[in-house]
Image: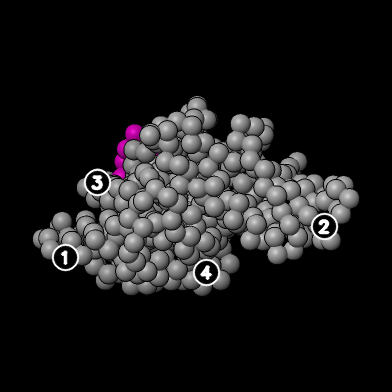
Amino acid sequence: MESIKQLYKIGLGPSSSHTMGPRKAAIEFLKMSEGAARRRVTLYGALAATGKGHLTDKAILDELEPDAPCEIVWLPEVFLPFHPNGVRFEALDSAGNVIADETFYSIGGGDIVKEGQSRIKASDVYDLSTIKDILKWCEDTGGSYWEYVDRCEDSDVWDYLREVWQVMKEAVQRGIEAEGVLPGGLGVRRKAVSYYVHAAGYAQSLKSRGLVYAYALAVSEENASGGKIVTAPTCGSCGIVPAVLYHLHTSKGFSEQRILRALATAGLFGNVVKHNASVSGAEVGCQGEVGVACAMAAAAASQLFGGTPAQIEYSAEMGLEHHLGLTCDPVCGLVQIPCIERNAYAAARALDANLYSAFSDGRHSVSFDRIVEVMKQTGHDLPSLYKETSQGGLAVIN
């Protein structure tokens, strides 16, 4: 299992699979096709179906057009066999002959795979890849999840997590100040500032919940407008972990050091899902994005409130279990409806999962690892209509 630095990616929204991944592939292909007179890029399947709403073409053209003219071809009805998010790059000379040809797949979380190769990834740094085994390590050593991260990662992981936390905080702070309509044509107004202001007028319990909503909306709206965010584990679910941690940092006074340790724990749980299943909405639906983010945030909150390793595992399990079957059906292919509200709801559910587990001794019937297996199978069983193709569910509402 690779570093959590590969899970937490800092970049521009609105989509890790439809914006960050294609941009990364374009940069790779640019290096492979120096001297091209022009280029042609063909988008397939889910990548083509919702690419315009996710600014896929803009991400690619921003990298390729400064070098040579580039044509975008859209084929949403054609699904390549490896993954729904396929993109083919062709470089042509002045006579129209193809001089370079490469196909990539954007597999979620900003990661890409080249045709015929395994995923382009960093080296594995973790010797354990299931929560069951990591939990046993915690019980045998007396350590916690973040200490397992510290044991396996290079020492610079804490500097990286500090940068991640800074970007998350800045996204919240920008988002609760921003006003106006989000780009894309749906006419969705930013709501974070309104929720933030209204929250101040309520008693403490309702104020607390209102602030969590506001922080999640803030980051999600920043993402929808192409702002700088952190995949946690994806762009479409990037508001959940920051909302929970920012709220606990500001309202409960948890130190930065403890927040970074909570980020490490959250990243570990997200990493296990990414390694054993998927965090791609086009592959397993929104359960792999918002569901996993809820599990990550629940684990982080449980750790901050002093949960045992078993209680932390239980909290994360509930965060994911109760999002099983969640579809990825954004209206018009934009990461706005229902994505933004889902982030706010899931942030609140993460705190509820932490509270529920805190009343228990951590023992429960279905393990986190089993839920990951079920999520993976459920995602594969979901029709493609409900996996980021804009062909079913909310996406076809008039």
Quick one: label 4, few (<14), some, or many (20+) residues within 10 Å?
some
Front residue (pair 324, 306): 324
Q: In the image, residue 337 lies at what x, y percent?
A: 38, 45
Question: Pointer 2: what residue?
Answer: 36
Q: Please, what secondary structure does the residue beneath circle 3 have?
A: helix
Q: Amino acid at mark 4?
A: Tyr
Residue at image point 45% right, 68% down: 167
Residue at image point 65% right, 57% down: 61
Quick one: label 2, few (<14), some, or many (20+) residues within 10 Å?
some
Which is nearer the N-term, disc 3 or disc 1?
1
Q: In the image, residue 110 lies at what x, y percent?
A: 57, 53
Q: Please, what secondary structure does the residue beneath circle 4 have?
A: helix
Front residue (pair 63, 290): 63
Tell me, yes or no, whether the highlighted magenta stretch contains residue 355: no
Q: Please, what secondary structure does the residue beneath circle 1 have?
A: loop
Question: Pointer 3: what residue?
Answer: 356
- Distance from Cα at disc 2 to Cα at disc 4: 37 Å
Quick one: label 3, few (<14), some, or many (20+) residues within 10 Å?
some
Tell me, yes or no, whether the highlighted magenta stretch contains residue 364: yes
- Distance from Cα at disc 2 to Cα at disc 1: 57 Å
- Distance from Cα at disc 1 to Cα at disc 4: 33 Å
- Distance from Cα at disc 3 to Cα at disc 1: 26 Å
Residue at image point 48% right, 32% down: 391
* 199 to 80, vertically: above or below: below
Decide whether the magenta segment is chiefly helix, strand or loop.
Answer: loop
Q: Of the residues tagged 3 and 1, which is closer to the observer?
A: 1
Q: Which residue of the protein is positioned furthest toward the left in this rendering?
A: 203
Part of the protein shown in magenta? 362-369
Question: Pointer 4: what residue?
Answer: 160
Residue at image point 75% right, 60% down: 68
